[in-house]
């Protein structure tokens, strides 16, 4: 239900407005001073404010100014001593409209409806912008993050190739986006390729394109990612999973700035800056014969290592608060407070899934907690030892049954068990839609197929 807040120090005015608005099926809150009104704006989901200008304790214009830093709720200012100057000042300070006492009923209701409509559009626009925008701020003030930001500022304007390393979910993709955004190529496309998500037999066609008839399913010519990124940036994510034959062709493209489509003979000039990322130790992959040393040296002109979240726990309060504001905004609810105790509890967690896991955790806490997220909620919903596990009747646990940790000989045994049960639960929940499940749990589809095979998971009818 739409909620309207009335701030006016005259009881008869508040009562009259309440009667009118409640008759129109609005939920109405009212206070007699600006301080209480601002407190309500911080705590409650308010869709519109009707605020008197001349009040004791705090002037209406002061309330309007203070409210701008709290929320985007539209204000309709009311005054019994209205002048053109007052109306202009109210508009300049961000008021939607200005009404004079005594209030005209029809004008009041029309203005209220218009203000609510505009307020809804403003909120919807902000949510859509956040969803569309890919380049979010790199959050954190720890020494390692400060160094990464400084490195991006230095390296981005150059043409140097960059290799970004770090664990899954640590933010490698975000670093790549900022390298592009701050480069001279920012006006040209940033094309992303996840090498782990593309089968090895298709990776060359994906990168370099193919000619019609070059293989059975090549029914028409296809432009590859190198050509799509011409003049811009090509981001090769999870490059450690690229096949050796594709690596050889990428090396040639980097050396000569030329590519040849699969099944074609013509050499095509390309002007592409390549940024690569991996969660693997490429030097070890080179030793094992899985990665070319010459390609490694071509890619790693600049090395940027993104630390895991547990290595920069001091950044967790900043990141968690930002996620909380973003997620609450997406749900169109007031931003929930995360208490100091809850922040300390979050900092103490292992965060094997890094930033991605933290965001999912904050969303879970927002949904399951009340107006504040406290240490109690974090302990209840984030600590595996305090969480009961539910699985299918396949030898796992039943609802409400506590896990017996003594049966695990090592930490790896426990991790494998928990991973297997979690993946099995998610697959069943999504009707064994592997693509949707991979998106839900934040891993690549190829990685999920590997896990299904590793744990011998099968769909139960």
Image (cartoon, grey):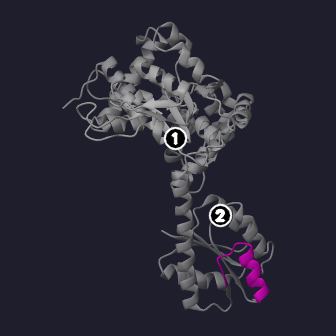
Image quadrant of residue 348? top right
| Magenta residue check for 14 | no
Q: Which residue is mark 2?
A: 40
| Magenta residue check for 95 | yes
Earlier-in-chain disc, 2 versus 1: 2
Q: Which residues are magenta?
A: 84-98
Using a 10 Å C-alpha cutoff, classify the residue at mark 2 as few (fewer than 14 neighbours), some (14 to 19) or many (20 or more): some
Q: At which x and y percent is residue 346?
A: 61, 33
Q: Are marks 2 and 1 in contact (CB under 8 Å)?
A: no
Q: At which x and y percent is residue 78?
A: 69, 83
Left or right of 422? Residue 322 is right
Residue 324 drawn above or below residue 12: above
Q: Residue furthest right?
A: 57
Q: Residue furthest left?
A: 461
Image quadrant of residue 123? bottom right
- Determine whether the residue tagged by mark 1 lies in a helix, strand or loop: loop
248 and 90: which one is in front? 248
In the picture, the disc for residue 7 is none
Q: Which residue: 46% across, 19% down?
A: 248
Using a 10 Å C-alpha cutoff, classify the residue at mark 1 as few (fewer than 14 neighbours), some (14 to 19) or many (20 or more): some
Q: At which x and y percent is residue 313?
A: 67, 29
Q: Quadrant of the C terminus?
A: top left
- Determine whether the residue tagged by mark 2 lies in a helix, strand or loop: helix
Q: Which residue is mark 1?
A: 230
156 and 423: which one is in front? 156
Q: CA distance from mark 2 to mark 1?
A: 53 Å
Q: Which residue: 28% across, 19% down?
A: 456
Left or right of 218? Residue 170 is right
Q: Which residue: 69% across, 60% down?
A: 70
């Amino acid at each position: 239900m739409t909620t309207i807040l009335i701030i006016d120090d005259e009881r008869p005015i508040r009562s009259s407005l309440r009667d009118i608005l409640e008759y129109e099926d609005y939920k109405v809150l009212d206070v007699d001073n600006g301080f209480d009104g601002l407190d309500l704006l911080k705590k409650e989901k308010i869709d519109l404010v009707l605020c008197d200008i001349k009040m004791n304790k705090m002037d209406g214009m002061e309330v309007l100014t203070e409210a701008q830093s709290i929320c985007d709720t539209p204000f309709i200012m009311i005054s019994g001593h209205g002048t053109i100057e007052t109306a202009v000042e109210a508009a300049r300070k961000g008021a939607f409209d200005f009404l004079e006492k005594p209030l005209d009923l029809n004008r009041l209701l029309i203005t209220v409806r218009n203000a609510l409509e505009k307020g809804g559009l403003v909120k919807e626009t902000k949510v859509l912008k956040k969803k569309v925008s890919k380049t979010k701020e790199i959050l954190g003030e720890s020494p390692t993050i400060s160094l990464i930001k400084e490195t991006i500022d230095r390296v981005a304007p150059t043409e140097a190739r960059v290799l970004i390393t770090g664990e899954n979910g640590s933010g490698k993709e975000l670093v790549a986006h900022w390298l592009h955004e701050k480069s001279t190529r920012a006006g040209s496309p940033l094309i992303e390729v996840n090498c782990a998500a593309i089968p090895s037999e298709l990776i060359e066609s994906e990168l370099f394109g193919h000619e019609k008839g070059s293989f059975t399913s090549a029914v028409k010519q296809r432009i590859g990612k190198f050509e799509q990124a011409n003049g811009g940036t090509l981001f090769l994510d999870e490059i450690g999973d690229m096949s050796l034959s594709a690596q050889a062709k990428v090396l040639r493209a980097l050396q000569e700035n030329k590519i040849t489509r699969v099944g074609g003979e013509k050499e095509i000039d390309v002007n592409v800056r390549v940024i690569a990322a991996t969660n693997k130790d490429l030097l070890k992959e080179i030793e094992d014969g899985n990665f070319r040393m010459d390609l490694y040296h071509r890619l790693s002109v600049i090395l940027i290592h993104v630390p895991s979240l547990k290595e920069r726990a001091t950044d967790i309060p900043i990141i968690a608060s930002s996620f909380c504001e973003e997620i609450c905004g997406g749900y169109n609810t007031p931003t929930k407070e995360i208490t100091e105790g809850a922040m300390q509890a979050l900092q103490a967690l292992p965060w094997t899934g890094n930033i991605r896991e933290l965001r999912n955790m904050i969303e879970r806490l927002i949904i399951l907690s009340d107006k504040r997220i406290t240490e109690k909620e974090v302990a209840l919903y984030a600590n595996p030892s305090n969480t009961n596990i539910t699985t299918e009747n396949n030898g796992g646990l039943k609802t409400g049954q506590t896990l017996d940790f003594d049966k695990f000989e090592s930490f790896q045994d426990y991790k494998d068990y928990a991973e297997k049960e979690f993946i099995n639960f998610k697959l069943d929940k999504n009707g064994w839609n592997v693509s949707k499940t991979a998106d839900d749990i934040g891993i690549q589809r190829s990685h999920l197929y590997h896990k299904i095979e590793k744990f011998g998971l099968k769909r139960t009818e």
